[in-house]
Amino acid sequence: MYAFWEKPAAIRRQRSAHARKAPNSALPTETERYPRGYQCTCLFPELPYYEPSNRMAPIRDSRERRMSIDTMIAFFRERTHGVLATSNRDLPHCSLMAFLPEEDGRFFYLVTRAGTTKYDNLVHNPRVSFLVDDRDEAAREGRLVARALTVAGRVLGVAAGADRSDLMARFLVRHPTLAELARHRAAVLVTVRMESLQWLEGPLAAEYEILPVDGGETALNGGGAL
């Protein structure tokens, strides 16, 4: 996790030549305690280094500890920014976004401008993924394992009228530095319904929950399509 194996230049040339003759034997096997012909380069020398034989943690049994939906949503609501993933014609696009979570935890709101890449993607494909994590808190607290939550959802449309004014006011209380964006003539406030949650703690311990869909279109309350 904090180190990678690389070959010294001389060995790299030697093994590359060997690989052309016997490609299946060019790489070390998992059974080798130390990969033959490799040297370790530590990415974070201040962190404890773990031997290769100990670098993989066991996968946590879901019966051992199950993260509740409410706990996942509480983690989501405590965050202020995340990475929005959109796509169009098989071309993915990621954007760092501020967001406003709804109190019931089943919806959240994003502010963007019409005509941007992400907006055009949403027009063609309303399905999105949104990632939040606590890597900054983990670093401050000295934790080696960060936690992340991936929310899969669907864009329902844009808020309008009184709802838009109320939501935008709440959004700016949470993100006052985005006032210029909110006042932009092309600014839109997008409503996203959360459909599933994937919790990740460390590289292997993962849990997945599907959220019940209960007529979320009413969340727009007079809003419109993108």
Image: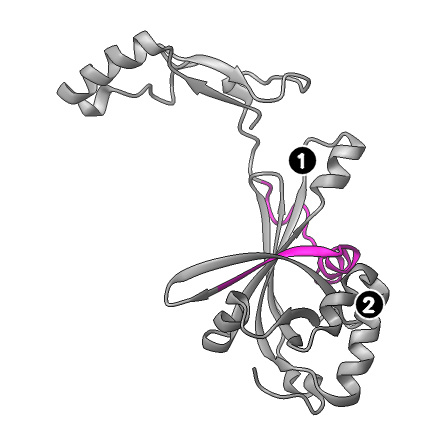
Q: In which quarter of the image is residue 2?
A: top right
Q: Pinpoint residue 56: horizontal percent, then vertical percent.
A: 53, 29
The residue sitting at 49% across, 59% down in the picture is 93
- Is residue 199 on the magenta stretch? no
Magenta stretch in the rendered image: 60-86
Q: In this view, does 58 lie above or below 186?
A: above
Image mark for residue 172: 2
The residue sitting at 59% across, 18% down in the picture is 50
Q: Is residue 67 above or below residue 13?
A: below
Secondary-structure class at tag 1? loop
Task: Answer few, some or many: residues within 10 Å of disc 2's Cα (few below 14, many 20 plus, some between 14 and 19).
Answer: some
Q: Quadrant of the C terminus?
A: bottom right
Instruction: Please tell me which of labels 1 and 2 falls first in the chain.
Output: 1
Q: Pinpoint residue 196: horizontal percent, then vertical percent.
A: 59, 65
Horizontal side, residue 36 vs residue 60: left or right? left
Label 1, on which residue? 145
Q: 97 or 148: nearer the eye?
A: 97
Q: What is the tally of numbered marks visible in this picture? A: 2
As measured in the structure, the alpha-carbon distance from the residue carrying label 1 to the one carrying label 2 is 32 Å
Task: Answer few, some or many: residues within 10 Å of disc 1's Cα (few below 14, many 20 plus, some between 14 and 19).
Answer: some
The residue sitting at 64% across, 69% down in the picture is 112
Q: In this view, does 182 lie above or below 208?
A: below
In the image, what residue type sits under mark 1?
Val
**Camera-side mark, 1 or 2:** 2
